[in-house]
């Protein structure tokens, strides 16, 4: 489904040189649930943004269903079935949750249909369907609403960049349940950038990125034990703090 061929990304460095963020990344994503992990600054979030079309690689190609999408925008990729969930979901003052889910679906949904997507992500539909997507919602609530949007859109590939960022322990536990349900029911692929053990444990395939390279990749049963043994000096966390 998704293939990265010799993908690299550089930014201007000191003295007119270049700083390499990613170098010669070759990756295929066809599994239901893939987790990309690695130390802070390893390039994994940059990789997610390249896949989503937020930034363009300085070298290499990105293919989706056999089509070269390297130069396509995030909007054009969305039309082809790729969704991207930001670390901090966007708030929309004046827009209700029902409006947002209908926009994602591309049609005006009935209240019952919109509510069904909220129920899928563990939110009480009656309490949320007519609420505005504004500052009154917590980070955890926003992230689950964003996942409801993705479910309504029916995408082929859903990309999540560190979904555990900025949420408390209770919200994180609920988020894990949502991802477990998505893993069971989704027809497309899920790609998550994370270093949370509980998220990695849901994955079918784990990709380890270190210093801009793929250091290891394979089935969870093969890779996770090595990661938990601090492979490549990477530190993994098993929980988030109660304060987020």
Image (cartoon, helix red, strand yellow):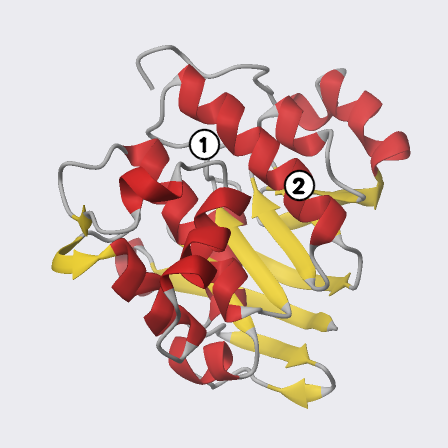
Q: Residue at x 42, y 42 (%)?
A: 144
Examine the rendering and report whether any part of residue 207 can be seen. yes
Element type at marker 1? loop
Label number found at residue 23: none
Q: Quadrant of residue 154?
A: bottom right
Closer to the camera, 101 or 13?
101
Instruction: Please state the horizontal and vertical placement of residue 210, each as a whole percent of the image.
Output: 62, 40
N-terminal of the two: label 1 or label 2?
A: 1
Closer to the camera, 94 or 1?
94
Task: Work out which quarter of the rendered image holds the N terminus and state it.
Answer: bottom right
Q: Residues within 10 Å of mark 2 (few under 14, many from 20)?
A: few
Considering every residue shown, the one lying at the far left of the view is 94
Q: Quadrant of residue 242?
A: top left
Position of 137 with respect to 203 (left or right) is: left
Element type at marker 2? helix
Label number found at residue 164: 1
Q: Residue at x 63, y 31 (%)?
A: 199
Closer to the camera, 68 or 184?
184
The correct choice, above or below, for 71 with respect to 35 in the image is below
Task: Work out which quarter of the rendered image holds the C terminus and state it.
Answer: top left
Label number found at residue 181: 2
């Amino acid at each position: 489904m998704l293939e990265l061929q010799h993908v690299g990304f550089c930014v201007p460095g000191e003295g007119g040189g270049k700083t390499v963020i990613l170098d010669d990344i070759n990756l295929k994503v066809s599994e239901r649930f893939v987790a990309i992990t690695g130390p802070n600054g390893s390039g994994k979030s940059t990789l997610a943004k390249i896949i989503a079309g937020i930034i363009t690689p300085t070298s290499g190609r990105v293919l989706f269903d056999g089509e070269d999408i390297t130069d396509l925008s995030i909007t054009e990729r969305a039309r082809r079935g790729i969704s991207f969930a930001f670390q901090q979901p966007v708030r929309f003052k004046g827009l209700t949750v029902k409006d947002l889910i209908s926009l994602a679906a591309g049609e005006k949904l009935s209240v019952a249909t919109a509510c069904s997507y909220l129920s899928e992500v563990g939110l009480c539909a009656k309490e949320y369907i007519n609420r505005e997507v504004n500052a009154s919602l917590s980070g955890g609530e926003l992230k689950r609403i964003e996942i409801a949007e993705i479910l309504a859109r029916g995408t082929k590939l859903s990309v999540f960049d560190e979904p555990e960022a900025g949420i408390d322990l209770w919200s994180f536990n609920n988020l894990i349940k949502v991802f477990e349900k998505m893993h069971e029911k989704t027809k497309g692929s899920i790609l998550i950038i994370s270093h949370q053990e509980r998220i990695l444990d849901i994955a079918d395939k784990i990709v380890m990125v270190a210093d801009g390279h793929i250091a290891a990749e394979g089935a969870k049963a093969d890779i996770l034990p090595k990661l938990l043994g601090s492979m490549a000096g990477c530190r993994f966390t098993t929980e988030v703090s109660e304060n987020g």
